[in-house]
Structure formats: structure tokens, C-alpha cells
Image (spheres, rainbow, N blue to C red):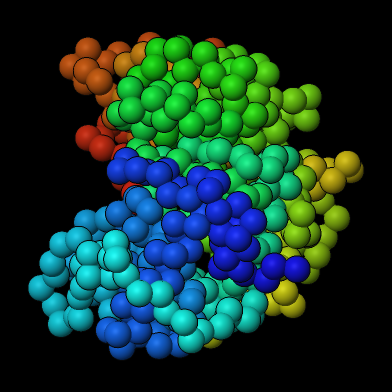
Amino acid sequence: MRNTILEIIAENAVNYPDRLCVVDGRGEYTYADIWHAAKCAAYELKAFGVKKADCVLVECTQNADYIICDFACNILGAYFVPVEHKASAANVQAIYEETEAVLLICEGTYEFDAKTVSFADVIKEEGTELEDWEFPAEENTAEILYTTGTTGKSKGIEVSHRNNIAIAENISFGTEMREGNVELIPLPLSHSHGLRCSYANFFRNGTIVITDGVTRVLDIYKLIKNYHVTAVDLSPTAASVLLKLTRGRFAEFNNQFDYIQIGTAALPEELKAELCRQFPDVRLYNFYGSTESGRSCVLNFNSEDDRKYCIGFPTRNARFIVTDDDRNEIRSGAGHTGLLASAGAMNMKGYWKQPELTAQIMRNGYVYTNDEGYIDERGFVYVLGRKDDIINYKGIKIAPEEIEEVVAQYKAVKDCACVPVAEKAAGQAPKVFLVLAKPEIFDKTAFVRFMEEHIDANKIPKYIELIDEIPRASNGKIQRKKLMG
């Protein structure tokens, strides 16, 4: 059994030396290339003083160099700590200091006290392979992934090698990924979704094709055709942008793709419908999970199993329960919801050096969430939204996404967000914030009439406020607490 992604790369370098492992904007890299480069990079890192259990920050350059540095850290038993490309100096400094990192590998320069080197210092064409090393144990830490901090201070999530194998299994079995899959990944590899998608493809001896976003459509088309891409990994935002930019032409790959997988945020019903329309013969997966509990539930929404708020079945290594507010397991249903919790080998080791915070959400092998939902009689899992976001209006629970999906269709609305506001008689009531394309011609009466025609009477927002911008995190998620403050 292969216990680490590193072992998979090493085995593939022997069994499939000439098979493409990574394709980026600069070239092609076989499994043999990546493995040789990783051992050479490990040699250089050791020369810089990196040793077992040291933290190494690596700026995400969205190319093979970044992947090579990941595996070089694994070879030394060091902890790989991704940071976003061109992240603010304050954020990088905070992570560097919190992890007590010994090195920062980056493209630019930072004006704080850190030992920094360039990628060219680590990855050399005529490098020397490190010889004296051993594969890390599966329970050892592989990486520390920092969240985007949508609800406060970013947290370092400690992930083991076994966690990464379990997540790779969840993805590869969840998508029915075939041997030698070729997947386009435009999502940033500094975040868990794109990075874990890469690991899953390596697990299936496949190829990843890396791009920096989806806006360079012609380049993406060339990559898809030249490398016969069989799958695509997208966020809802990336999928929406790609469909808009291609104006229906992306559907020409309906007969080429095996699947498209979506994750990182809630998937709007309108976008689901459009993807199904353009790709009737493609498996379309919506993944549920978090950095703490990776890829724990999946649904092929281009199938008869698709239902509103349904996130599908637990993935290969996951199991779910529903609890009350005191974390006691309950029998749930559409009329009796609770909070979701998941257990399995994909669950993180814990928050980096924060045992008290870890204890707040982990107990008895379960990661407890603030997501309100239920499990039906067939075992399908449903998520209505985050408990703090769910609007409890006179006992009726309203998911803000349900309102936003309708409001976003109004022609004058550029962006929107719905949040609960306190109301003495009803407990809470829905309020909608609007960003308008042309505020000067907005007709509030016509907008209210539109909502009355498309939203149930007991769910229509009672309050409407016009603002200049909806606060969103870097991954596109609405920062509702800023609107509720």
C-alpha cells in the first residue's frame, strides 16, 4: 500500500517514467522529471539548513516549480506551507512567524526578517540528487494549509500524509476517475481544492494541466485540445466566468470530458442548470468539504439524484451524522434539521499549535461544522447553509442562497447578498443587499414585484439596501458577518 503521495510519485517515476505528470505554461514534465527535480531540490533545501519537522513557506507560482518544492519538503520530512501568489507582506509575515519557518521560497522580496531564496536557487537544471533520505511515515505532517479567513483570523490546518491519501481516494473514487486521467486545474494550488485535485490525479497515475485562472480562453482551449484533457476542476465563480467568456462554445468538449468537478463554495441552481444544458453527456460533480475535512461528500448533479440543497453521498472515507446544538446525534429529516459532522481518515490532525481551537470542532474523530442540514431516508446529505446565516423567520428556515439565486437574475442587479436581521415579532427576517449596474434607473417597486413573482410570500426579503460592493473573500465567498455587523 502506498502511504504517501510522495511514494506514488516515486513509483510512477519507475513504472511510468515517460508519462506526463505536470503541464504548465512553460512546458511538460514527466513523472521521471518531477521525481528527479524533487530530489535535486531536496538537496538544495538541505544545504540551506532545512531539516525534518521544519516549516518551509512556498509562494504559489502555479507551475511545476511549486509542485517540485512540495515534494522536496516531503523528502526531507519538512512541512510544506503554501502562501498565495503575491500575498500581502503582512499575511506572509504572520504565517512565517506563527510557523517559525526556516525558509521562504518566493519570486519577490519581503521587507521583514525572513530567510528567503528564489525558485532558481532551489530548482536547478543540472542539480544533484539527495541520496540519504527516507519516505515519511503516514501519520507525519505533510503540510500546513492556511484558510482564507472568511470569518476571522486565518488558521493553519495541519494535514498528515495519510490525510492526503484519504482525500485523494475521496476525489478519485468520487469522480470515478479513470487511470491516466488528464485534468485541467485553473484553481490556485495554494488552496486546498486545487492542491488536493492534483494529488488525486497523481494517485490515479494521471496528468495535471495547470493554468492561472480561466480568463485566457484561447490558451485554455489549446491545452484542452493538445493534451486531450478529460476532466476540469472549477469553482462556481470560475465556471460562471468560463461559460460567460466562451459564450456557449465550451460545450464543444461535451464529447471529450469525462467529468467536471465543482467545489470551494455553494453552487447556484442557475449555474447547475446551465452546466447540465451545455454538458448533457458529462458527469458533473459538486463536492462538499473543507480544508479541515477534505472532500467528504459528492453529488453528480447531472443525474436523477440531483435535488435542491442535496450534496450527495459521503465519499469513500467519510461518514456523516447530524447533531443538535450540544453535539448529540439526532435522527434528522427535511422537517427536523441539525448540524452536520463528518468523520474519516481525511480529517485534519488539528489546527497548528492551537489545541484549544482544535478541541472546539474536533471530538471522537468527528469534525463538527456550523452547517445546518439533514440526511434523508436513502442516505443523501443536504445542506441548507451555515447556521449563523440561516434565517429563522417565524419558524420557517430560509437559506440566503435561495434568495440570492432569484435576486441575481433581476436584470438591474450586478451582485447581491442576503442576511438575517433581528426582528422582535418574527425572530429574524431576510434582508437583501444589492449592487446595481445602473443605480440611477433602479425601480424598487418593480424589483419587489419581481420578488413576489419568484419567491414564496413568507420568504420575500422585508428589507432592501443598496451598497457599492458585496464583501467577498478571495475565494468568492460572501462575508456575511460584515453585512450583519
Task: Give the camera-side residue of 31 and 198.
Answer: 31
Q: State which quadrant residue 99 falls in.
A: bottom left
Residue beneath the point at 77% across and 54% down: 316
Q: Left or right: where does residue 252 sit relative to residue 69?
A: right
> Residue 323, image x and y in percent?
75, 62
Q: Is the C terminus in the top left, top right, bottom left or bottom right quadrant?
A: bottom left
Task: Give the camera-side residue of 208 and 164.
Answer: 208
Up-down relation of residue 386 to residue 124 (above or below): above
Kindly give the residue lying farthest to the left in the view shown: 111
> Residue 184, image x and y in percent?
48, 37
Residue beneath the point at 41% across and 53% down: 189
Up-down relation of residue 395 to residue 274 (above or below): below
Kindly give the residue lying farthest to the right in the view shown: 377
Residue beneath the point at 66% across and 50% down: 204
Q: Is the N terminus in the top left, top right, bottom left or bottom right quadrant?
A: bottom right
> Residue 111, image x and y in percent?
10, 73
